[in-house]
Amino acid sequence: MATIDYLINGINAWKSSKTRFLTRLMTSDLIIDEIDSYQQDDLISIHKLCYLTGFYGKKLIISSATIPDVLISTLYNAYQTGYQRFAKFGDKADKIYVGLFSHHDRLNKIYTNNDSIDSKINQYIQELYHAIEAEPVKRKATMLDIGDYLHSGTETKTHPPEFYYKLIESMRECHQNNHTVIDGIKVSTGLVKFSNTVDCFEVARFLLNLSELEEKLQAVVKIECYHARHFPIKRAYVEQQLNKLLNRKNSKDFKNNKLVKASVEKAKCENYTNVILLVVSTTIIEIGRDFDFDWGIVEPASHWSIVQTAGRILRHREQYDKNNMVILSHSMKAVRKSEKVDCYYRYPGPEDHKNQDNYLSSDEKEQNIKQLFDFDKLSEKIDSRVTLKNQDGITDSAIKRVENNQIQSLRDDKKILFSFNSYLEENAAEYLTTANSDEHPFRRSNIKESTYKQDEYGNWLKRDVKTY
C-alpha cells in the first residue's frame, strides 16, 4: 500500500534521488481510487503516472462511481501509449485487455485494444446511465437560500449571525423529516459539509458555544467537528467513533450504540423528544469513509462533490421518505469574502486559474445553484448520472460547462502550457527538465515559481505563481 503523493514524487522529481519512488511502479500493479476527485493540474500528473504504469508493463485499475466518459478515455490513451512503448522495447505483443465494470453485473464488459475503445466506453456509459436512472430514489435536494448574506464577512466575523440561525432552522427541518424513533425519541444523524476548513471550524464553534441551541431545537445535540487538520491521533479516534455510530447496516447496532443510548436517556431526563447527532465536516467526508447519515446540508463545489457527499446519506439503507439533502444556494466564499473574488468554485471546484475559458463570468459568480447547477435533476434524484456523461458541448448549466471544459482540455489541450500530450510527444525539453512538473505541480503545495516557454525567440522564462 502507498499513497499517491508517495508515487508522484517519482513523476515530478526535482532531484535524481527521488526517482527511487519509481521502483514501486516498476514492480507493482497500480490501483487509483476516486480518480475524479483531483484538480486539473493533479490529473496531468496522474496521467503521467498511468503512462509510466503502461511503460513498465504493469496493470492499471481506475475506480470511481462518478468518472466521466472523457476521463476514462484519456486515462486509457495514456496507459495505452505507455504500454505500446513497453511492447516495442521488449519485443512483446501489443495487446491490452480493457474491462468496464459496475454494480450492475449484466453491464460488465471486457474488450481488447483492437476494438474501438472510445465508442465502447461511450456505449457502456450510456447503458450505465439508463440503469442508474431506473434505480429507486434515495436522495433528493432542496435549496437553502443564503443570498442575503453575500459578502457579509468582516475581519472579526467570518459569517453573520443570521446565517447561523438560518442553518439551525434547516437542521431542525431535516431532522423532523429524517429520523429513527427509539423509545419514543426521534434520533437522527446529520452532516453539515463545507468546502473549506475555516467555514467548518467557525460553524462548529458557533454551534458548540450557543447555549440555547438545545432549547431552540428542543433536542439533545451532540456535535463533532471532523476535518483533515486534526492531529493524526485525534483524527484516528474521531474516525473510530464515527465508524461505530454511522454503521447502519444493522438497526440494532445503532440503537445499542453507547452515544445513542446515553443521548436518548438524557433527552428523557430533560423532557426533550429529539436527539440530533451532528457532524460538521469538510471535503474529507466525500471519499474513503463508509458513513451513513440520515440527512445532510452541503455547500456546493461541483456536481461531483454533491454526488459524492450524497453517497454518505442512506448509504446502508434503502428507505426514503422526504427530501434528505439541502444544498446552500451559494459558495461560502461568496459569504465570507467582503468583496468579489475571481473564483468561488475553485480549490475545491472546477474553475481553472490558468484557463479563462474555465472561469464563471462576472454575472454568473453571484447566481444561486438553481441557475449555476443542474438543480432540476438534483431535486428529482441525486445520483451519478449528472457526472457520468459529458454532453459534447451541450451544457445545461454554467458549472456543467466549466466542468466539461476542464475534462475536455485533457484531450484537446492546446491552451494548456506543458500539457500531458506534449509530454507524450517525446519533447526532449520536457523529459530532460522539470518544466512540465513545474507548470503542473501535484496538489499545488509549496509553489514558488513556474517555468514556461513563451517569448518569440523561444527563450525559457520564469514567472511567480501565487501559492494556494
Image: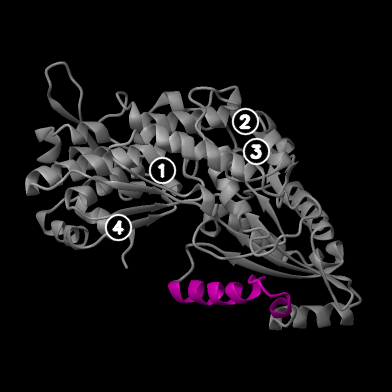
Point out which mark residue 372 bears.
2
Category of crowding for the residue at label 4, using alpha-carbon neighbours closer than 10 angstroms: few (below 14), some (14–19), many (at least 20): many
Query: Range of the magenta residues?
Result: 232-254
Residue type (three-letter) at the residue carrying disc 3: His
Residue 205, percent from left and from top: 65, 62
- Whichever of callouts 1 and 4 sits on the residue coming sooner in the sequence is 4
Residue identifier under label 1:
39
Taking 296 as reference, is 45 above or below it? above
Q: Left of 15 or right of it: where is 38?
A: right
Q: Nearer the viewer, mark 2 or mark 4?
A: 4
Residue type (three-letter) at the residue carrying disc 1: Gln
Q: Nearer the viewer, mark 1 or mark 4?
A: 4
| Whole-number angstrom distance, CA of label 4 to CA of label 3 | 38 Å
Residue type (three-letter) at the residue carrying disc 4: Leu
- Whichever of callouts 4 and 3 sits on the residue coming sooner in the sequence is 4
Residue identifier under label 3:
330
Q: Left of 26 or right of it: where is 383?
A: right
Q: Secondary structure at mark 4?
A: strand
- Whichever of callouts 1 and 3 sits on the residue coming sooner in the sequence is 1
Q: Residue at 69% of width from left, 32% of height from top?
A: 370
Category of crowding for the residue at label 2, using alpha-carbon neighbours closer than 10 angstroms: few (below 14), some (14–19), many (at least 20): many
Q: Residue at 65% of width from left, 61% of height from top?
A: 204
Residue 24, percent from left and from top: 21, 62
Q: Secondary structure at mark 1?
A: loop
Q: Secondary structure at mark 2?
A: helix
Residue type (three-letter) at the residue carrying disc 2: Leu
| Whole-number angstrom distance, CA of label 1 to CA of label 4 | 20 Å
